[in-house]
Image: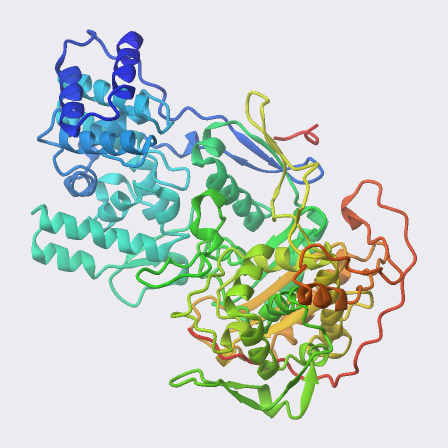
């Protein structure tokens, strides 16, 4: 059999230039040649090794296993609506072909050969079962050929209904559910033989990409897939128009949100052991799934030492819970804390309650990824659009950051030689030149403004009209590129979509608290970027190291002088600007942010050893943050800043105080640009350089305390409320 496969592989490699008809002829010949008398023994569909998740101290905090989610069913238990839904969506010619759709397979093979890689699918249900039961999951031509041959042989030994049943027993449907029996139980809490048409369509829609379409984390995508399957069933005459209309009127509804407003397809929360740190464990699972695939975590027997600091996580959960106490769903808050010198995520809270909150297992600390627009010119693409970046999303959409986006504009300006002393007019309203239609007027909050201001004062007071002018001077494309370089995964720029009217400086791109904390951490790390990660070290069941971040190196993305000057201005936000509620009595820098109509409020800030972002808002995005716990209007400088203060005060209480480096003058940058010698200049001598340390409370032996430099005198500002912005819409010890 192996010789047969090898011969076929050689034939394919040598036939790259032959027409598709020849490829079809070769494939057909092999499918109909006499084959071995028996199939190989199928793999155990639910073979699984337990994966162990540990905290930074080596204590087990969770275990992950797939096999315990498998629920065997009998062939007679599979309802006709489920069979029809799967066939309609996955293989409409299932009852007509002999295991391989020759036309589709030939087309896919030819595309793969032309591109010298696997670019197309073309698998039938029989081939998909063969992949689950007999072959490995590597995507290459050899595997596809072997699948085709085994599928043809399988069809000669079993009838179609038996093959379909075997497939439905083996298919993975997300949330550790193997087979339709487990999926029916985990999502709908019912046996498979009681599935409705709508529920059957939803399960069928999960098959191509369970992680992307699972209804708890991605209800909108799951709903779209459910509707797509129902349309295919109607078009292929599996259901009547009346049945279609009834099923279409039953949209996906998360059962933890209470009684639905009408007919619905109810999705229940997972029946699982309550974990101590569910949002962080969820983050770890999503990270591994995105980078290594779901089979790694569910079948690989991994031992994962994470960066979670239990003491900090406890403080984060306490700070969020205290601020949400006395409020109700869907009001939410999320927090992410990252260690700038390593990128290790030390604490993460993604919402009110992972198990009983209205939005269930949606992890609001992780955000989402915008759909890439078509038919428009895109000058800066989002990091999350590139699959090779393995972006981790949490089932939500991300939130607009408001004025907490302004530091990225400052970094862009300083990199271009603009100085903190640059003065702009600061009118109450700035009308964008040559602008017509909506969003042409940029307002300051409560009429604040008037006269002129330099960038230091405008940053402390968060004056929108100054930053609207600044971003137009330095460029929206360049600002988007800067934010992307700092690690914001969902920032992108199209001059015909966002436009550079001035609003771009005020946070029109949706971001996540994790991205925000990591990006601000670049300023704390003086221009070095350590991408956020929850993994310290990870090994598989055979002891092979899959990931080791114990000696990771940062990526230099920003000049030290630029990073230090951004920090210098952001210190003024806390010492005398819109973020005074975040003052923790030690060197810290940060920025408030509040979006139009008070839908989102932020405070993101950092010390040399810890960067933390706090977001507050309604999870359904339908309500403004008004009249909450005695706060008439929730700005970023109110409840979010207080939450940041409460968490950081406790997180750093045993950490030696370290100051930021005094910033070198930016004049050298401006002079170098003027000489067209950018990139080769000397940023200048630092005044009283300070060693900021590399760890704080996260080292076994923390560094000795260092002298604290005096704060840089900053321009005195009048404390005031934040601004609003106008936006467009394994167990047992450490891994050694």
- Could you tell whether 69 is left or right of 199 in the image? right
Q: Relative to 215, does residue 668 appear above or below in the rendering?
A: below
Residue 616 at least partly seen: yes
- Could you tell whether 358 is left or right of 589 in the image? left
- Could you tell whether 314 is left or right of 583 in the image? left
Q: Relative to 699, does residue 716 appear above or below in the rendering?
A: below
- Could you tell whether 634 is left or right of 356 in the image? right
From the top left corner, tell me how far across and down residue 233 is, in percent. 14, 48
- Where's the N terminus, which quadrant? top left
Count of numbered labels shown in the rendering = 0
From the top left corner, tell me how far across and down residue 73 is, in percent. 27, 31
Q: How is the image coloured?
A: rainbow
- Where's the C terminus, which quadrant? top right
Residue 74 at least partly seen: no
Image quadrant where residue 211 sits: top left
Closer-to-camera residue (733/606): 606
Rendered residue at 75%/83% (across/down): 717
From the top left corner, tell me how far across and down residue 251 is, in percent. 27, 59
Rendered residue at 52%/43% (across/down): 287
Rendered residue at 21%/52% (across/down): 228
Closer-to-camera residue (211/486): 486
Closer-to-camera residue (494/370): 494
Q: Relative to 562, does residue 167 appear above or below in the rendering?
A: above
Image quadrant where residue 473 sits: bottom right
From the top left corner, tell me how far across and down residue 336 is, in percent. 62, 56
Q: Relative to 42, does residue 303 appear above or below in the rendering?
A: below
């Amino acid at each position: 059999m192996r010789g047969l496969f090898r011969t076929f592989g050689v034939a394919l490699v040598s036939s790259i230039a032959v027409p598709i008809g020849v490829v079809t002829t070769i494939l057909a010949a092999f499918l109909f040649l006499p084959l071995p008398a028996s199939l190989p023994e199928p793999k155990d569909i639910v073979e699984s090794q337990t994966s162990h998740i540990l905290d930074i101290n080596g204590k087990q905090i969770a275990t992950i296993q797939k096999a315990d989610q498998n629920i065997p069913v009998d062939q007679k238990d599979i309802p006709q609506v489920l069979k029809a839904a799967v066939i309609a969506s996955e293989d409409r010619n299932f009852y007509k072909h002999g295991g391989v759709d020759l036309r589709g397979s030939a087309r896919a093979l030819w595309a793969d050969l032309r591109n010298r890689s696997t670019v197309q699918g073309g698998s039938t249900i029989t081939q998909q079962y063969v992949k689950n039961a007999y072959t490995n999951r590597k995507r290459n031509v050899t595997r596809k050929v072997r699948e085709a041959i085994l599928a043809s042989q399988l069809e000669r030994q079993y009838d179609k209904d038996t093959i379909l049943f075997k497939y439905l027993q083996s298919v993975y449907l997300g949330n550790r559910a193997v087979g339709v029996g487990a999926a029916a139980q985990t999502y709908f809490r019912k046996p498979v033989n009681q599935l409705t048409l709508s529920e059957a369509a939803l399960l069928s829609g999960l098959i191509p990409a369970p992680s992307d379409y699972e209804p708890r984390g991605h209800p909108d995508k799951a709903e779209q897939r459910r509707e797509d399957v129902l349309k295919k069933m109607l078009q292929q005459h599996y259901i009547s128009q009346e049945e279609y209309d009834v099923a279409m009127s039953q949209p996906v509804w998360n059962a933890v949100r209470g009684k639905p407003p009408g007919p619905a397809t109810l999705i229940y929360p997972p029946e699982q052991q309550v974990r101590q740190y569910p949002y962080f464990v969820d983050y770890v699972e999503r990270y591994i799934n995105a980078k290594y695939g779901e089979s790694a975590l569910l079948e690989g027997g991994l031992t994962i030492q994470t960066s979670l600091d239990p003491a900090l996580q406890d403080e984060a959960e306490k700070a969020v819970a205290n601020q949400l106490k006395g409020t109700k769903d869907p009001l939410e808050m999320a927090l992410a804390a990252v260690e700038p010198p390593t990128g290790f995520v030390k604490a993460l809270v993604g919402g009110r309650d992972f198990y009983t909150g209205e939005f269930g297992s949606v992890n609001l600390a992780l955000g989402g990824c915008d759909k890439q627009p078509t038919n428009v010119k895109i000058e800066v693409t989002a990091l999350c659009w590139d699959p090779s970046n393995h972006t981790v999303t949490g089932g939500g959409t991300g939130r607009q950051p408001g004025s907490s986006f302004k530091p990225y504009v400052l970094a862009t300006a300083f990199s271009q030689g603009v100085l903190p002393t640059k003065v702009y007019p600061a009118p109450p309203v700035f009308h964008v030149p040559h602008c017509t239609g909506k969003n042409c007027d940029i307002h300051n909050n409560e009429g604040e403004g008037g006269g002129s201001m330099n960038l230091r004062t405008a940053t402390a007071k968060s004056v929108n009209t100054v930053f609207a002018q600044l971003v137009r001077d330095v460029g929206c494309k360049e600002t988007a590129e800067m934010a992307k370089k700092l690690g914001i995964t969902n920032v992108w720029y199209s001059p015909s979509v966002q436009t550079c009217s001035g609003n771009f400086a005020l946070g029109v791109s949706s971001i996540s608290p994790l991205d925000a904390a990591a990006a601000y951490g670049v300023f704390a790390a003086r221009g070095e970027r350590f991408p956020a990660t929850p993994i310290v070290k990870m090994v598989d069941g055979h002891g092979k190291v899959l990931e080791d971040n114990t000696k990771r190196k940062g990526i230099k993305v920003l000049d030290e002088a630029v990073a230090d000057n951004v920090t210098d201005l952001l210190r003024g936000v806390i010492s005398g600007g819109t973020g005074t509620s975040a003052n923790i009595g030690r060197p810290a820098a940060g920025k408030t942010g509040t979006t139009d109509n008070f839908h989102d409020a932020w405070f993101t800030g950092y010390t040399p050893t810890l960067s933390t972002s706090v977001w507050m808002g309604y999870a359904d995005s339908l309500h403004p943050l008004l009249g909450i716990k005695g706060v008439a209007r929730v700005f970023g400088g109110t409840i979010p800043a207080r939450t940041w203060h409460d968490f950081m005060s406790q997180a750093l209480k045993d950490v030696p105080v370290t100051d930021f480096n005094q910033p070198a003058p930016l004049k050298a940058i401006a002079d170098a640009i003027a000489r067209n010698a950018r990139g080769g200049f000397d940023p200048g001598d630092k005044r009283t350089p300070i060693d900021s340390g590399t760890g704080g409370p996260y080292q076994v032996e923390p560094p000795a305390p260092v002298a604290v430099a005096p704060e840089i005198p900053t321009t005195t500002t009048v404390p005031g409320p934040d601004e609003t912005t106008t936006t467009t819409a394994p167990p047992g010890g450490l891994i050694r």
